Image (cartoon, rainbow, N blue to C red):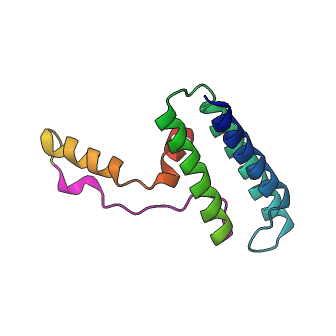
């Protein structure tokens, strides 16, 4: 990891922790605000530790883009949790063969950038 990339990643981590410190839930309830603050801190800690040993520059760039996307979406909608996506079930594919593999590939490609690591952690 280059020093510039390292500084960018550390800056993102500090930004997420700063957001968690000043977070206010949409409902304004104290319990919900505390729960959401804890979720933001735990999610950041988990994902940054999981990706600590990543050395591929393309993968690092993807992780940075995912983090920035999740920050922007969270701040815009005032919801810290990833927004769900609604893809049709794999009912169109047969239970085996090329069609199923193709369907799985399409589902993986269509996953938004802000959810790339969500299923791996949850």
Q: Indicate the position of residue 7 as horizontal and vertical percent values.
A: 71, 38
| Left or right of residue 110: residue 65 | right
Q: Indicate the position of residue 98 as horizontal and vertical percent values.
A: 13, 40
Q: Is residue 7 positioned above or below 55 on the image?
A: below
Q: Which residues are magenta?
A: 77-93
Q: Indicate the position of residue 45 as horizontal and vertical percent values.
A: 71, 39
Residue 82 shown in magenta: yes
Q: Going 27% across and 50% down the picture, which residue do you hit? A: 106
Number of disc labels = 0
Residue that extends furthest to the bottom in the rendered view of this protein: 27
| Left or right of residue 62: residue 91 | left
Q: Indicate the position of residue 1 as horizontal and vertical percent values.
A: 60, 28
Task: Choose between 23 and 8: the one closer to the eye.
Answer: 8
Q: Going 64% across and 70% down the picture, which residue do you hit? A: 76
SS majority, magenta: loop
Task: Choose between 75 and 6: the one closer to the eye.
Answer: 6
Q: Is residue 63 positioned above or below 32 on the image?
A: above
Q: Going 40% across and 63% down the picture, which residue do you hit? A: 86
């Amino acid at each position: 990891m280059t020093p510039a990339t390292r500084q960018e990643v550390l800056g993102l981590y500090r930004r997420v922790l700063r957001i968690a410190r000043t977070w206010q839930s949409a409902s304004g309830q104290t319990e919900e605000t505390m729960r959401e603050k804890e979720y933001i801190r735990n999610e950041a800690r988990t994902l940054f530790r999981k990706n600590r040993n990543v050395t591929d520059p393309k993968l690092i760039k993807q992780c940075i883009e995912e983090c920035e996307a999740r920050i922007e979406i969270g701040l815009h909608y005032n919801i810290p949790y990833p927004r769900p996506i609604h893809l049709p079930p794999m009912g169109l594919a047969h239970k085996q063969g090329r069609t199923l593999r193709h369907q799985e590939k399409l589902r993986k490609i269509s996953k938004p950038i802000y959810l790339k690591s969500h299923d791996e952690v949850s």
